[in-house]
Image (cartoon, rainbow, N blue to C red):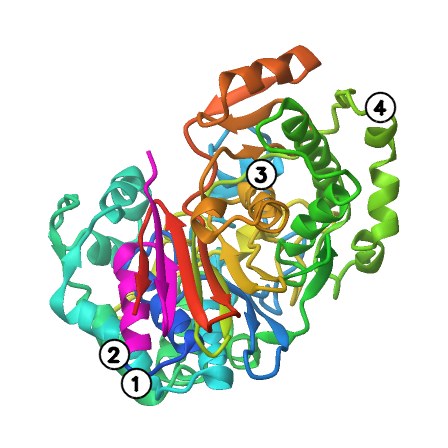
Amino acid sequence: MTEDYEVTSSVGAVAAGPPEAARVGARILEQGGNAFDAAVAASMACCMLQPQSTGVGGYVLCAVVLEGATGNVWTIDSNSIAPRAAHENMYTILPTGTIDGINENEYDCNVKDNANVHGSLAIGPPGMMAGMGTIWERWGQLKWPEVVAPSLKLLEDGFPFGSTAASIKHLEGVIRKFEATEKHLIPEGRLPDPDDIWHRRDMEKTLARVAEAGWQDFYTGEIGRKIVDHVQATGGILTAEDMSEFKPRVTEPYSTTYRGAEVHSAILPNGGLSSLQILNMWECLDPIPDDTVTYWHQFAEILKLAWRDRLLHLGDPEHVDVPVERLLSKAYAAGRMETILQFPDSVDQLVPPHMGDSNDGTLHVSSADSGGNVVSVTISQGGAFGSLVTVPDTGVILGHGMCRLDPRPGRKNSVASGKRPLNNTVPLILRLPDRDVAAGMPGGRRIIAVNARVAQKIIDFGATSLEAVSGPRMHMQTKEPVSVTNELPDEIKDGLIEMGHEITTVGGLGGGIHCAEYLKADDTVRAGGNTWSAGVT
């Protein structure tokens, strides 16, 4: 059962999970920070509180931001990059059925020793710290130590293990193979309970160093040297050059319009293009209420088309040919929708090759302030605790960006030197006449569909943040069955089955959605979220 929250403010607001991270962002706004400062502070607090989902050593931060003063929209791509020594044959491929996990679920294969998932060969330069530092450096207005201070305070006081305890228990067998990780996550040698207070003393020292020396120390200074030394000593290929050369990209976003509203999302190899494609195809149909069988039938058929394009065409455009302009064009969307328009009640029963699925390991932060600044940030460790490699005496658990590249050679998303991995993060900014909205969520491949529906509800139905995050969800990839949540009424599910759809009902699809809105009429801010709370000043 999820809980929904909505708050309004004359200053600013943050929607995020876990709840203390949202409160950290709210306190930054109270201290005179803007939406950028608040988003960075809340993201850093997420790294402290929920390291199974993200961490300062996490592999990706992906954001879309709106500058209130100029109206310019930018995307920040701080996605890990394969080290220079990486190559497409670096992993030994095994048949399925040998090791359950990311490779089996997502790539329909396995890798010897699970080497692209756990261990030092899974590690590229971590994107999380550079992403936070870049947002603050370019748009923040507080001093860097002021943005770091709330997370340091969390560490000094200690906090309950909370949901991290269950993740530790689930991965206990693997965690105990990594001495520094076991010491950090199981500090007393026994599995922690959710209510046990956690003091991340090594992380406290690291964050104090970052506050004093600056975020770049993570890549070119003392912390960066410790990361490289440990990765190399344990069989990894990450070098000092890989770390020092790593830079987030700040560019114009991918953009489209949907019924006159502007929709902006992150560039490839992040997931925004697929959600924008869904909206382009949806626009070919007349708007209809979402309490009808036809609405959900149309949504399912559009998802099949978007996912077939995603898994066939997409990768890092700097390494493989991706027809981005064509995929984002209205003409292409109209062509893809021709069959649905001519045969509106037909259910596509094509069965493409197995394309797998993925798990969750992600969080999202949305913020806005009365100056019209709007920030949408998705942050991820990948799978729980990433590579499970902890740098001794630092508390830094490194992400496994390499497992987001296909370990099998000869594919669009296969491993290559300097290649960015395809991922599912979809931070969104919507620009409507009366408001600007940041939206996003965690949830692996489920993000693509659910975020597109959030945007559609806001634009077609005028949904507020609270209304946008509430209600039924749907997810599917290239073929049936269609997954829907319990909230979808039985009569709609029955109607879909009568049409020929195969329906699977699940308790949830993805994590909490978090939205923050700047309301133009009176320069106020509204934020809403579910599962976790929204912070406000």
Q: Position of residue 13 (x, y in %)?
A: 37, 66
Q: What is the magenta range?
A: 1-30
Q: Is residue 59 above or below residue 361?
A: below
Q: Circle 2 sits in a helix, a strand or a loop, which is it?
A: helix
What residue sits right under mark 3 in the picture?
106
Q: Earlier in the sequence, mark 4 or mark 2?
A: 2
Q: Earlier in the sequence, mark 1 or mark 4?
A: 1
Three-letter code, disc 2:
Ala
Q: Is residue 143 magenta?
A: no
Instruction: Single out the residue that lies furthest toward the front.
Output: 521
Residue at the location (63% across, 77% down)? 72
Q: Position of residue 54 (x, y in %)?
A: 39, 58
Q: Earlier in the sequence, mark 3 or mark 1?
A: 3
Residue at the location (68% across, 73% down)? 252
Three-letter code, disc 1:
Pro
What residue sits right under mark 2 in the picture?
149
